[in-house]
Image (tube, rainbow, N blue to C red):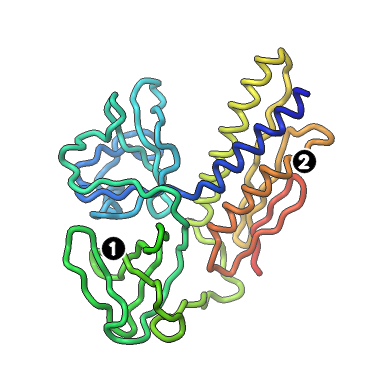
């Protein structure tokens, strides 16, 4: 019975994490955020360059603590980089009164693909708190995530601009077209992709550690905590589940982890293959 309950809880947590979609935080005055880097040290100026106004920040852990055990924070990912945003004890972001527009878009669908506008003035780009404008033919747009009927996008300006595009009723192939990857067949996996995959696996391992610690305490057992190990090379990433006992395949939790990894490599020349206890990201 205990093993069955354990399996059900593993399944429910996997479903909750994967089917709930992703949350993205968008802030206007990003220069007012208190930011710590992945080493949990105050981020220097060069690490803050990616914090342009309205940049989408994928929320990894909405309510976290720094290593000191008492500083509340939010763990987010920006262009593959993990940073920590300091929070007040009441749960709000530090200096929230100075941040201007601040909103978390929940249950969003990650896209991370690039489209080209095919006709003049057919598609409108709507920045937050700024006038909308019509896009021109041959403009390129990075689609970051879709929330309800709108898509949050980046247009390739300097500095980059972010805003909403409504693709509803706009014909693919007529008004816009998806740009296919033109990377050569012998290209290597990008550093950004590797970082995203490592971050996702680390998150899964944290959940496994907490679950096994809880159930070992409840059942007075000392079951070894399984952990995903990541090995990388230029052409592939191999994830193996270590520490599982005979008969444990964790099929459901593996299935949802595979779905998350497929979202990360979506639109690239790489694919995700898996078998019990093994996930491989490789060239198609």
In the displayed structure, 259 sits above or below 6; it is below
The first of marks 2 and 1 along the sequence is 1
Asked if the residue at tag 1 contacts the one at tag 2, i.e. Cβ–Cβ closer than 8 Å, the answer is no
Where does the image place residue 214, in percent across and percent down from the top left? 62, 20
In the displayed structure, 178 sits above or below 103; it is below
Q: Which residue is rendered at x = 75% and y = 34% of the image?
A: 244
Indicate the quadrant where residue 274 lies: bottom right
Q: Nearer the viewer, residue 120 or 220?
A: 120
Q: Which residue is rendered at x = 26% and y = 48% of the image?
A: 27
The furthest residue to the right: 246
In the displayed structure, 60 sits above or below 156; it is above
Q: Which residue is mark 2?
A: 249
Mark 1 Cα shell of 10 Å, populated few (<14), some (14-19), many (≥20)? many
Give the spatial CA distance, label 2 vs label 1.
43 Å
Q: Which residue is mark 1?
A: 163
- Of badges 2 and 1, the one in the foreground is 1
Where does the image place residue 14, in percent across and percent down from the top left? 61, 41
Where does the image place residue 250, in percent across and percent down from the top left? 73, 40
């Amino acid at each position: 019975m205990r093993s069955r309950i354990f399996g059900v809880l593993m399944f429910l947590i996997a479903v909750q994490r994967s089917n709930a979609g992703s949350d993205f935080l968008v802030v206007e005055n990003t220069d007012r955020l208190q930011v710590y880097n992945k080493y949990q040290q105050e981020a220097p100026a060069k690490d803050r360059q990616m914090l342009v106004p309205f940049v989408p920040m994928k929320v990894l852990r909405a309510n976290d603590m720094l290593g000191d055990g008492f500083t509340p924070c939010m763990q987010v990912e920006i262009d593959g980089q993990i940073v920590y945003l300091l929070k007040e004890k009441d749960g709000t972001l530090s200096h929230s009164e100075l941040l201007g527009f601040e909103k978390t878009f929940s249950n969003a669908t990650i896209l991370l693909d690039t489209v080209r506008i095919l006709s003049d003035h057919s598609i409108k780009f709507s920045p937050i708190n700024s006038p909308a404008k019509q896009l021109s033919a041959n403009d390129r747009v990075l689609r970051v995530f879709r929330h309800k009927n709108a898509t949050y996008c980046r247009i390739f300006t300097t500095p980059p601009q972010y805003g909403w595009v409504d693709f509803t009723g706009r014909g693919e192939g007529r008004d816009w077209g998806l740009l296919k990857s033109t990377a050569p067949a012998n290209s290597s996996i990008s550093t950004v992709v590797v970082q995203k995959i490592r971050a996702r696996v680390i998150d899964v391992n944290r959940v496994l550690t907490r679950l096994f610690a809880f159930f070992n305490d409840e059942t007075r057992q000392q079951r070894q905590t399984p952990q995903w190990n990541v090995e990388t090379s230029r052409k592939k990433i191999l994830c193996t589940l270590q520490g599982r006992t005979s008969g444990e395949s964790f099929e459901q939790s593996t299935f949802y982890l595979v779905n998350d990894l497929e979202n990360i490599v979506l639109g690239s020349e790489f694919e995700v293959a898996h078998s019990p206890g093994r996930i491989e990201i490789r060239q198609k």
